[in-house]
Image: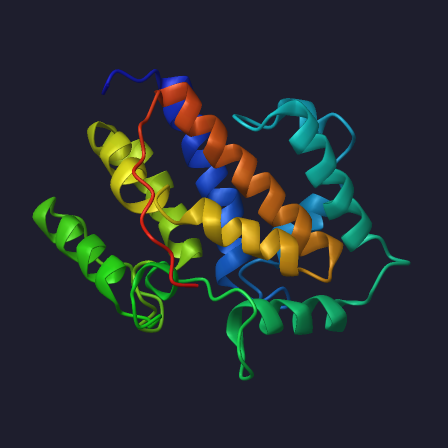
Amino acid sequence: MHDMSEETREAVAFVGETLGPLFLYEPTDAAVLPMYEALRSLDSAAASEWPFAAPADAQHAFELIERGLEPTAADDDELLWEFRRLFVGPMKKAAPPWGSVYTDRECVIFGLTTLDLRQWMRRNGISRPDHDGEPEDHIGLMLLLMAWIARERPELLDEYLTEHLLTWAPHFLDIVEREAQHPFLEGLACLTHSSLQGMQEVRNLDVTVPHFYR
């Protein structure tokens, strides 16, 4: 099913470009500070206008995001440390952001999920993202790649979602929603999860879920 309107492609790109960096960069990184400022200024209509996500899920997610960014809420340091606890370390990560950690028997980065994605990208002439040597199957990079594919190679989007992103991302996002101890990150996971689920439904995609080792 490769037919896709320009409106749908732009909506997919918007979701990927908006959410991807929030998983990829620490909250205090200059690359995402403008995005956090934009999120602080959103009004209640944002949830109803967000693409793909179920309205109730989007409303719940934005309420969590708003609560996490309130001036009276936890300060930026608390959000930063929770981001690191979940995704970065140096202690054991509560929700490692790489697909192969969940799908590889050894629960390692640069596992089979990474290599399969790398081969798929090479086969389709897609350049490897340059982000400090980060494995290609980092959720933030994969959301940004989803946005790029939607705009530049839309004929590949369904295959990318079915074979590479939707195989493990919902499982990962379930873990983030369960483990997050900061409302912003819980809301981010909820919004991402519902958005991807909505894309799957809109595109009528049949996804084979692998065995998860974590």
Q: Quadrant of the C terminus?
A: bottom left
Quadrant for the N terminus, please. top left
Q: Nearer the viewer, residue 179 or 98?
A: 179
Residue at 17% of width from left, 50% of height from top?
Answer: 121
Can you name the residue that lies furthest to the right here?
72
Residue in the foreground of this view, choosing between 171 and 136:
171
| Residue appearing at x 33%, y 73% in the figure | 108
Q: Relative to 125, does residue 214 appear above or below in the rendering?
A: below
Q: Quadrant of residue 136?
A: bottom left
Q: Measuring from the top left, give residue 160's x and y in whole percent.
A: 26, 39
Residue displayed at 67% across by 74% down: 81
Q: Residue furthest left?
A: 123
Query: Which residue is the extreme one toward the bottom?
Result: 90
Percent across and percent down for residue 139 are: 42, 55
- In this rendering, the count of numbered labels is 0
Residue 195, percent from left and from top: 52, 34
Q: Is residue 165 above or below residue 131?
A: above
Residue 207, image x and y in percent?
Answer: 32, 34
**Vertical order, 30 against 22 (above or below):** below
Drawn side of residue 178 relative to residue 59, left or right:
left
For the residue pair 187 and 176, the one nearer the viewer reads as 176
Residue 94 in the figure: left or right of residue 144: right
Task: Give the color scheme: rainbow, by chain, secondary structure or one colour.
Answer: rainbow
Q: Quadrant of residue 159?
A: top left
Closer to us: 3 or 196:
196
Q: Residue at x 53, y 73 (%)?
A: 93
